[in-house]
Image (spheres, coloured by chain):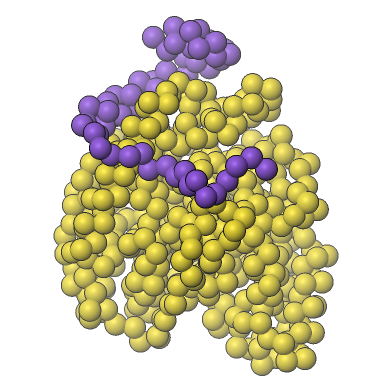
Chain colours: A purple, B yellow
Amino acid sequence: MWKTIAQAMSLEIPDDQLAAIEPALDALWKGARQAFDRDLTGVDPAIGFRADVGGEP
Amino acid sequence: MTIQQVAPDIRAGKVSPVELTKQALDRIRRHQPAVNAYITVMEESALAQAAQAEREIRTGHYRGPLHGIPYAAKDLFYTKGVATTAGSKILRDFKPDYDAAAIERLREAGAVLMGKVGLHEFAYGITSNNPHFGPVRNPWDTTRIPGGSSGGSTAALGADQCLFSLGSDTGGSVRIPASYCGVVGLKPTFGRISRYGVWPLGHTFDTVGHFAHSVADAAAVLAALAGPDPHDDSSATEPAPRVELPPDAKLNRYRIGLASGYFFQRIEPDVEKAVRAAVEQLRGLGAEIIDVNIPDMEELTVLHRLILLSEATALHRRRLKTRRADIGPDVRALLDQGQFITAADYLDAQRRRRQFVHTLNKLFDQVDVIVTPAAPNTAPKIGDATVEIGGQKEDARLAATRFVRALNLAGVPVLTVPCGLDSKGLPIGLQIFGRAFDEASVLLVGHAYEQVSGWNHRRPDIRAV
């Protein structure tokens, strides 16, 4: 599955290196699924944007 | 030797900052082959800074407890005209044209910068087994890792090559090496210390922290570093905390949460024994110990990984494309994993993060601080990709970060203090955390414990491999 996704996203990862990270990706997704199944309606992401700060230098 | 012990003598002119600096340089020369803590030793400028401190003190211009004190900085703090590698081959020759805010504040406090110390490549890992600058080694056993990513900072301090050191913590990079090297580590509240001029990794987690040989020393360094900085958007507007640490501190009014369940389910027996003994000492100091449950720790640990994978890959994506062969295999593998995370995954993880902050804040209605083991194990051997804990083999990096990562989601202040040695003679760490911006409680509890336990005074007998 990861190889198909990598190809679709045009990621330049050699086959052996992709194979090496597949178990980690499987485990990550298995662990994250519980969080993504939760109802997070009304919860804002914990990342900051402040209109009074920033802008390109 | 601690800062608190030597500072009065420096002030009184009984101890010379130049002599102190020369002693530290001598320790660097003697132990660099064994521990490989330093990437760059700044001998000339250190001696010049020490001489200036000595002149100022002699003429009545004492700046405070860090005046004339030698320290080391993780090699991701920008230093004007001095190589700042972030542990990377790609940045080997990078010389910033300005100093990090933390370096500037320590200069104002009169501290003496001895040099730049090693770290895991790009601060992205816990071993400090660096493919470009060689492995940093644990002074307690030089066949073992010091932890990371701030491994050079704790190895240098553990080897008495400085009296305090700077590090950074994105997912445990202060607390893991503090625990593995038997020193005090403080990861303050996110935003407490400016990260202007600090090479980033995960922009919603990166926190400047530091290491010392006592909690009182860590408090003195915090006082010099903390405070708002208009150059850093993440910098909090809170003023530096007022911390009072009396020598006979008692904890009679303190409610200390002992996080049970997850934190004791898969842990080395020596670590559990030491942590439970520390809790009894806290009880003996008058604290009320209350069992607390921090729910969903495994899920939150995964979410921290997911967010960090995404943020680190966003930061390094161009280098991954253009300099792939110049990035070490373990860091490259993490950066590759980050490419698979979608924006929706990232944002949902950040939304779940906010729920966790709410949950943790409610826990702090019941208790003042919470204690846990800092790590489930003591320092593994250099090169060991897996460790066995409780009869179960697991990835060494995931094991080391199990008890620390989720706290970066909440950005709360966390202190690690030494609380024992295992049967192999390796240090064990106790993790103490509190409400955001309540460093004062965390430091007071750690300080009171230190007064009765004394584990922070143990030093390694350094032997080369």
Q: Residue at (19%, 49%) from the top-left corner? A: B261
Query: Would residue B388 be seen by someone viewing this image from the given angle?
Result: no
Query: Would residue B151 be seen by someone viewing this image from the given angle?
Result: yes
Q: Residue at (48%, 63%) from the top-left corner? A: B237
Q: Quadrant of residue B391?
A: top left
Quarter of the figure that contains the N terminus of chain B: bottom right
Q: Nearer the viewer, residue B380 or B97?
A: B97
Spot the residue most to the front: A52
Horizontal and vertical percent position of residue B328 = 61, 30
Rendered view: B323 above or below B258: above
Horizontal and vertical percent position of residue B280 = 22, 70
Horizontal and vertical percent position of residue B136 = 60, 48
| Number of disc labels | 0
Q: Nearer the viewer, residue B398 or B101?
A: B101
Rendered view: B310 above or below A14: below
Rendered view: B14 above or below B392: below
Q: Nearer the viewer, residue B419 or B227?
A: B227
Q: Residue at (58%, 13%) from the top-left corner? A: A12
Rendered view: B277 above or below B351: below
